[in-house]
Structures are given as C-alpha cells and as structure tokens.
Amino acid sequence: MCPQVLFSNRKPGRIATMEEYRQSGGYKALSLVVGKWTGKDVCAEVQKANLRGRGGAGFPTGLKWLGVPQEGAYPRYIAANCDEMEPGTFKDRILVHADPHMILEGMVLSAYATGAEKGFIFVRPSYESGARILEREIQRARDAGYLGRNILGTDFSFHIVVHRSGGRYICGEATALLNALQGNRPNPIRPPPYPTVKGLWGRPTVVNNIETMANVPHILRNGAEWYQGLSRSSGSPGTKLFCVSGRVNRPGCFELPMGTTLREIIEEHAGGLPPGCQFKACLPGGASTRFLTSEHLDVAMDFESLAAIGHRMGTAAIIVFDHKTCLVEVTLNLTRFFARESCGWCTPCREGLPYLGDLLRRIEAGEGEEEFIPMIRTMCGHLWNAYCALAPGAASPVESLLTNFEDEVREHIRQRKCPCKA
C-alpha cells in the first residue's frame, strides 16, 4: 500500500473539512513552529528534507527560501501557483478539491520562514470552483486563528488572497506570474535579481507551486528523516502526485513514492492500456517534456533518474500514447498550443514556434519535404536562446520526435500522407 500523505484526507465526491484536517494532524506543525522556532530553523528543516519544487523546475525549496535576505526590504510576499495551464497537468486542481487547508497551512509556514505578511494564490479561470473553495476555507482558517492578525496568539500575522488570473501558460513562469499579479503584461523577467530579492512591487517574494506548499506541514510535523523515508529514491524524497491521462484504462491522479517506476504507474495504478493497444510512447512530465519510449518503462520517476537519461520530471503529468497514435500530429497539436500561449516577448519563441508548427502541419498533411527535418532541428536549437525556459520546454517534444521517431516523420514525407491513418 502506497503511503498517502497529501491525499490522506481525500474523500470521494467531497472536500475534507477543516475539522477532518485537524483530526489528521493538520495545523499541528503551525502550533509547533510559530513563536517557538525561528524562520531560519524552518528553512533548515525543509532544506534537510530536500523538498524540491513540484511545479516543474524542481528547485530545492529550502534553498529558495534562504534566498530571501535576512535583513532587507519589507513587506514580503508569498505567491502560490495554482494556474496549472500545461496540458495533461491537473494535480493542483485535485489537491484543492481534496484538502485545501493543507495548502493554507503550508503557505502560513512558508510565510513564517521568510518573514512574509501577505500571500496570493494564483488560480486560472477554469478553476473557479477551486477559487471559491479556497476563499471559503481561508475565512474558516481566519476565524479559527490560523490566519490573519496575531496567528495563534503570537505577534505573527499573515493574510491570503485568492487571485483569479487571466489564464495563460506563460504565467507558469515565476516572474511572468508576478507581473500578472501586479496587473502588468505577463512577460518574464530575466534574473538577477531573483524574485526572492526583488519580486512583487520590488519586494522579496517566494513563488512556489501549491503541491510544494502542501508538503511543508508534514515535513515540520514529522521531521526531515521521516519525509526522506517515504521515497524509493535516495535523491528525491517524499511522495509525488502523478497525473496519468491518454490511452490508459484508469486515468487519474495518484500519490505515489518518488522513485516509483513508470511501468508500475501506467500498468498498475492507471490500469494499463485498453485491450488491443500497445504502448508506443509517453510524455513523462507534461507537454513540455521529451517522449519516453518502451525502453524507458522501468525508469524510476524521480528527478535524478530522469535526468540521468536526458529527461525532466516536469510536473509528473504522464500522457500515454498507443501504437495507433500519430506522434507527428500529437507534436503538432502541442506546438500549436505553445505558439498560441507565447507571450511574444522574444523573437525565438514568437517567430520560431509558428514556424515549427507550419513545418509539422505540412508534414502531417502530406506536403513535407526531406529538407524540413534539418530545418526543424535548427529552429529547435534557436528556441534555446529564448528569454525564458518555456521556449526550450516547447522544443522538447519536437526534438524528441526526431530523436525517437524520425522514421515515422520520414514515412509521412515518403508516402505524402499520414501513415497512421487509414
């Protein structure tokens, strides 16, 4: 039985109440820490646990918090990212609908660690139900003394606001998110200075994914060693929320130990592929990661194991494709999404993604030429010179299409049609 930490209070068809969260140990970490530990102590314990960001980049959380100057500008802010615009990724929505107080306690603790006095939960428009849940539970936490002024009778105060975003993929980039929060166009800002030094309104700001925040109360309540023991991997502690979609029998969101193999996730937890379907490939961490093939089914799903074979964990959203799927069409669909969602700030992304989309469209339509393949490779290389990391992410499925399935691309060109369609 896999340990359920983030989903310990997950109930079918309803949200865990604040009282149910408290009965499971909720807000005990807050009582343990506030007024008794220093912010530096909290950062040290999270760093010892080696909690890494769950939003895609995987940056060490404790190290990020320590980037906030010990002395310096006030006020300070927390920005919790629940925008979740990447195709195939829906774990944050599930988490909000399962146990919102876990997220709220994690935010309060991160604020205590960094000296922040106000937090924002950045929510996409289609998550309106989640936004309403969060607003309702914020008020309940405030009434109980876990939020607001003088939390638990101490001199520590922290307030949370739910911010409904315009809903763009670019807002998953931390500095673009901060621009959007300030009412500006969501273009990324190339550091330094980093947001922990100069973020919202020029003040220190910590940006974390809400799944990252939800891990914090468990670490502080149970200790770093306990947290490390949850994993099957020595380098990537804790559990992870894996979203599985595509050609599987039981698509869904599963909490599993870090280091669980891709094969186990797909075949056991997601129920395998339907009868008559054979595994062809998957995207292991959302739309901005590279295709994994059947030779990678036994890879451990953790940061180090995937990096060792040239892949990224990303959001751990696994999208499965069977042998009947045309991966040229899949990659074209993804490229169109990324082209539409580009902020348009820099030339490689603004011009390069539509260019790639046009070449892939022509190949899929039977209008491709052999010279398109080196042209695609060259343009993917240019995307690595873009202003932020989202353009290289958009290039990842295109690059891996040519790495793993160049024969399929060439068949499109040779037959002057899609060979996967009757």
Image (cartoon, rainbow, N blue to C red):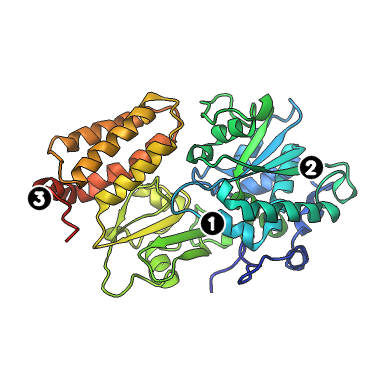
Given the image, on which type of amino acid does mark 2 rest?
Phe
The location of residue 290, given as percent across then percent down, is 34, 48
In the picture, residue 396 is in which quadrant? top left
Q: Residues within 10 Å of mark 2 (few under 14, many from 20)?
A: many
Marking on residue 91: 1
Count all numbered tags in the image, as a single digit: 3
Looking at the image, residue 151 sits to the left or right of residue 243; the answer is: right
Which residue bears the numbered disc 2? Answer: 158
- The structure residue drawn at horizontal position 59% and vertical position 67%, both measured from the top left corner, is 4
Mark 1–mark 2 Cα distance, whole angstroms, equals 26 Å
Is 358 or 313 nearer to us in this picture? 358
- The structure residue drawn at horizontal position 41% and vertical position 47%, both measured from the top left corner, is 312
Looking at the image, residue 57 sits to the left or right of residue 300; the answer is: right
Given the image, on which type of amino acid does mark 1 rest?
Lys
The location of residue 64, given as percent across then percent down, is 61, 38
Q: Residues within 10 Å of mark 1 (few under 14, many from 20)?
A: many
Query: Residue at the right extreme?
Result: 153
